[in-house]
Image (cartoon, grey):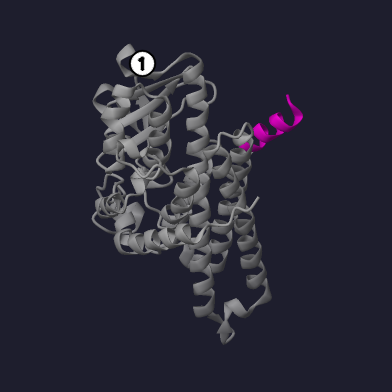
């Protein structure tokens, strides 16, 4: 089976990259942070959104990729959306693109009652709403949602049930996070019959699919982030000189960058394989997603570590762009299950324990 992107997919990815280069600059990411000092300058006081980028993606039709044509979407699949999420990650766009265009679009199309799907899916396809997702942590408790205050709806999961809740019906407890543009909040809420999207066996299946898509989206964005960090490191290595020559000419630097890049190259096919499995409801989709998320998390952590090492002391400063991408990578690597969590899922499936 071949997972290379088609010419049309590559062309769309290039278009999304150009769009985000114009609308989601490092300054725009900084402005999304609530604390200007921690972001390294800028106006601060942001809410985690980049309206120019969101609007441009909506105009291009990105939010309608997985929405059925009957609801105003493009009727495509995760195999078409996931490559675009690599570009979203590369730009460190803090908007809930994956949760809206991936998790919410697919869940509402597949599991929601017709009236609810008719109400929300056209708005999702048009980019008129932001949808956040929150899963209860291991051991129970309130879920944590990124950009919860900026979302128009929240998909929340409780004991095998799926609920679509408006932010006015929940209590948000802001949380400190390594990536301030994520605006994480603990969501305290109570399920009601009016908010129920799916329950029983359907609810359990919908919850599992939604978690897989959330983890897959994070894995795709981690691959994009990794490439952005390594590109920055390689560029810096050609400019920074020691002993009268660029540090990129030293074998030690070359080897570090090559090893980190190789890990990313191995992660991407796993992400594309998982997208295929999720799109076609492969019985092993959860295992493939966990393989992708574990590998992408490790690759991103390695890319961040190597990029920081190459940059030296300047890489620690908040004024330098690198920290925006490193912090996003650290945050996403831990979201929707870290590498250890997903390795346990793979081990349990392989050993049937």
The answer to whether residue 82 is left or right of residue 121 is right
Is 344 in front, or is 115? 115
On the image, which quarter does residue 108 sit in?
Answer: top left
Q: Position of residue 329 (x, y in %)?
A: 49, 50
Q: Dot 1 surroundings within 10 Å: few (below 14), some, or many (20 or more)?
A: some
Q: Secondary structure at mark 1?
A: loop
* Quadrant position of the C terminus in the picture: top right
Q: Is residue 346 magenta?
A: yes
Residue at figure coordinates x 35%, y 54% from the top left:
39
Residue at figure coordinates x 49%, y 56% from the top left:
224
Q: Is residue 142 visible?
A: no
On the image, which quarter does residue 349 sit in?
Answer: top right
Residue at figure coordinates x 33%, y 42% from the top left:
73
Q: Position of residue 232 (x, y in %)?
A: 48, 67
Please name the residue that numbered disc 1 is placed on: 191
Direction front: furthest residue: 70
Is 4 in front, or is 93? 4
Is 50 in front, or is 85? 85
Write down the region rendered in magenta: 341-353
Residue at figure coordinates x 57%, y 64% from the top left:
309
């Amino acid at each position: 089976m071949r997972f290379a992107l088609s010419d049309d997919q590559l062309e769309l990815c290039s278009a999304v990259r150009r769009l985000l280069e114009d609308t989601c600059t490092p300054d725009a990411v900084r402005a999304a942070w609530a604390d200007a000092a921690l972001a390294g300058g800028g106006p601060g006081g942001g809410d985690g959104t980049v309206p120019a980028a969101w609007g441009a993606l909506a105009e291009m039709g990105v939010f309608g990729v997985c929405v059925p044509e009957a609801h105003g979407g493009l009727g495509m699949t995760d195999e078409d959306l996931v490559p675009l999420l690599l570009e979203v990650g590369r730009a460190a766009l803090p908007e809930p693109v994956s949760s809206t265009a991936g998790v919410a679009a697919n869940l509402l199309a597949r599991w929601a009652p017709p009236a609810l799907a008719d109400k929300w899916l056209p708005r999702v396809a048009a980019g008129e709403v932001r949808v956040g997702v929150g899963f209860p942590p291991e051991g129970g408790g309130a879920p944590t949602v990124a950009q919860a205050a900026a979302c128009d709806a929240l998909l929340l999961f409780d004991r095998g049930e799926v609920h679509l809740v408006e932010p006015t019906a929940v209590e948000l407890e802001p949380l400190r996070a390594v990536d301030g543009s994520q605006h994480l909040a603990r969501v305290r809420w109570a399920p009601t019959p009016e908010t129920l999207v799916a329950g029983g066996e359907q609810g359990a299946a919908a919850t599992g699919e939604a978690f897989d898509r959330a983890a897959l989206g994070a894995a795709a964005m981690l691959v994009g982030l990794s490439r952005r960090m390594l590109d920055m490191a390689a560029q810096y290595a050609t400019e920074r000189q020691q002993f009268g020559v660029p540090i990129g000419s030293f074998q030690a630097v070359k080897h570090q960058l090559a090893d980190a890049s190789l890990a990313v190259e191995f992660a991407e096919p796993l992400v594309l394989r998982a997208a295929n499995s999720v799109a076609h409801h492969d019985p092993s989709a959860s295992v493939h997603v966990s393989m992708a998320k574990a590998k992408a998390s490790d690759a991103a952590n390695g890319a961040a570590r190597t990029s920081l090492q190459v940059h030296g002391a300047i890489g620690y400063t908040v004024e330098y762009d690198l920290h925006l991408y490193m912090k996003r990578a650290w945050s996403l690597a831990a979201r929707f299950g870290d590498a250890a969590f997903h390795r346990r899922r793979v081990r349990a499936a392989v050993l049937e324990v």
